Image: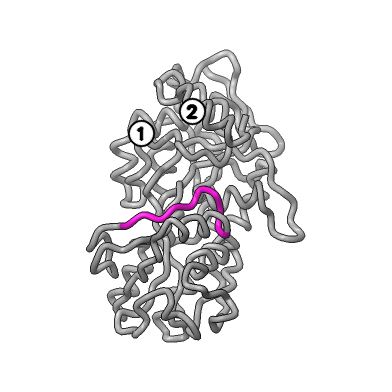
Amino acid sequence: MLKTQFSRRGCLALGVGMSAMAWTDRKAFAQRALALATDRAGTTFNAIGTGIAKVAARHSGINISIRPFAGPDAWLPQLARSEIHLGAVSSFSAWEASQRPAPGRERIDGLRVLFSGRGSLYVGLIVAAASPIRTIADLRGARMAAGYGGHRAVLASIESVLAPAGLGWSDLRSVPVVGIVDGIDALVAGRVDACWVSLGQPQVREADLKIGIRYLPLINTPEAGVQMQRIAFPGARIETVPADAAPGVPAPTPLMTYDAYLITNNALEPNAATAIVQSLWDHNEELVSAHRSLGGFTKANAVTDLPILPYHPGAIEFFRAKGAWTEETDRLHRAAGLT
């Protein structure tokens, strides 16, 4: 029987003599749950994290519980201290925490990727369907949801899509909100004219039923892409989603996109990391069908071609064995300074 123990800091430690491939005694992992952090209920990353946790817990033998927070700034320091063991997060938020921390905050080291999803997350600005605002340039003087206490990355994202239209925060009327969902609530209540959201997130669909909403098309030029990567972060890109991809998209609409991650820290035992990754790989059809936002968490995207953070050694070992981690992957990680 595989022996397990937990350290004082709550990090799962596994017997080193057995590969994750040979884990057969699920009872050995039922004594304590690993915590997986997400954003608040109703957000895209809560849906992503919940879907991942269900599939991984069902097939890895490790209990995984969901811990919702206002935003990643609230839980990433806890992940670094192994008070939380896993997290569902955008590559943007993870990159900021490790490379561009907020003033007064320490850089968070030791974050590691387990599984990546591409195209799972599209983000942008919405307005009421009846709003006269049709373009980014029309936002001059508009009431914009701002602050986003738990989501510092949102502020840079908004700035990066305003810049190609020659706009900045000083050209708007900022209305502070606590988080993404609060911004949507403010739009429905008529307190703001625009807010930042994910494509198709549940609260946006509810807002569409209540007032009708519309996504604003981002300026989609090479210059706009360069500005987005400079102001937001290097992994951001602009892609056009097709008409009717979600409520509020009556025509093909350029939006911002970047990878979504399942992350851990470098203290998680390799066998535990491998078991979780293997469960998501072996049961990938179940994973991608768990929620529309998990559609990009395919085997082909599990190892990103735009690395921002290093992968966990247990994940690397598994992906090498599957042929998903190649010499080109090594080259991309070296080029990004991640080795």
x and y percentages locating residue 2 in the rendered image: 53, 19
Residue 249 horizontal/vertical position (percent): 28, 67
In the figure, is residue 243 to the left or right of 7? left
In this rendering, position of residue 305 left or right of residue 283: right
User: In the displayed structure, would residue 74 be above or below residue 141?
Assistant: above
Tell me if 247 is positioned left or right of 17 in this view: left
Q: Compared to 163, does 190 lie above or below?
A: below
Residue 52 lies in the magenta-colored region: no
Image: magenta residue range? 231-240
Q: Amino acid at mark 1?
A: Ala
Instruction: Give x and y (percent) for residue 91.
Output: 52, 48
Q: Residues within 10 Å of mark 1 (few under 14, many from 20)?
A: few
Q: Which quadrant of the view contains residue 147?
A: bottom right
- Residue on which the image places disc 1: 300
Cα gap from disc 2 to disc 1, whole angstroms: 13 Å
Q: How many callouts does the rendering have?
A: 2
Question: The C terminus appears in which quarter of the rendering?
Answer: top right
Give the x, y percent position of residue 271.
54, 24
The residue located at (30%, 57%) in the rendering is 241
| Residue, disc 2 | 329
Q: 60 or 316: which is nearer to us?
A: 316
Residue at 48% across, 66% down: 161
Residues at discs 2 and 1 in contact (Cβ within 8 Å): no
- Mark nearest the camera among 2 and 1 is 2
In this rendered view, identify the residue nearer to me: 1 or 53: 53
Towards the viewer: 67 or 105: 105
